Structure formats: structure tokens, C-alpha cells
Image: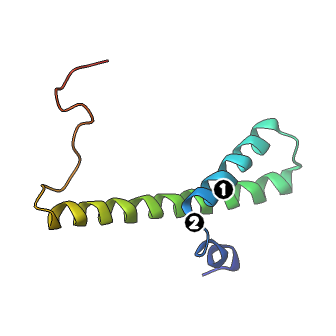
Amino acid sequence: MSAAEADLEALGFEKAMAELEDIVRRLERGDADLESAIALYERGALLRRHCEAKLKAAEARVEKIMLEAGSPAGLAPLDPQGGGS
């Protein structure tokens, strides 16, 4: 595990997402030199993977709670009536 990956371990989802959004804004502005842009992109890729892992872990916890409560696990529609918007 690299030092960059190690410092993500303690980073919560919200802070990681905020940092990722900041990186995207900086890259979209295009004001970073090539080396800085590459470093930002690498950090962004790590943050994306970190956020995805946090979301998957949260989803697994919710499914476990649902199973323990006797509810079926998995995704349920937001609109139980099935109506569109």
C-alpha cells in the first residue's frame, strides 16, 4: 500500500468526495501544468476507488440491517406505486 493510499484509510466519505470534486474542478479549469495535472488525476483515481469502497460497505451494512429486520435485502424502488414523475 502506498503512502497516498494509506492516508485515505482514515478519510471519511464526505471529505473524500469533497476533495475529489475539488480535483475535478481544478482539472476542468486546465490551469495546472502537465505534471500537476497527472498527480491530480492519480489522486482523483484513488479517491474515486475509496468512495466506491465506502459506498459498497455502507450498502452491505444496510442489507444486513434489512435482513436482520426480516425485510428482503436488495434494492427497492423509491416509488412503491411504480408511478413516474
Which residue is found at the position 12% from the left and 55% from the top? 72
Q: What residue type is disc 1 on?
A: Gly
Residue closer to the observer: 36 or 11: 11
**In the picture provided, is 58 more to the left or to the right than 39?**
left
Foreground residue, 65 or 6?
65
Check contact, mark 2 vs mark 1: CB within 8 A: no
Q: In percent of the image, x 79 and y 44: which residue is there?
A: 26
Tell me residue 16's x, y (percent): 62, 59
Give the quadrant of the N terminus: bottom right
The spot of residue 52 in percent (x, y) is 47, 58
Q: Quadrant of the C terminus?
A: top left
In the image, farthest residue toward the top: 85
Q: Helix or strand or loop: what does disc 2 sit on?
A: loop
Which residue ends up furthest to the front in the rendered image?
69
Q: Mark 2 against mark 1, which lies toward the viewer?
A: 2
| 4 left or right, relative to 34 | left
Mark number, residue 12: 2
Residue identifier under label 1: 44
- How crowded pointer 2 is (Cα within 10 Å; few <14, some 14-19, many 20+) is rated as few
| Percent of width and height locating residue 19 | 69, 55
Q: Is residue 38 left or right of residue 81?
A: right
In the image, is residue 45 above or below residue 21? Answer: below
Q: Circle 1 — which element?
A: helix
Position in image of residue 79 (x %, y %): 24, 31
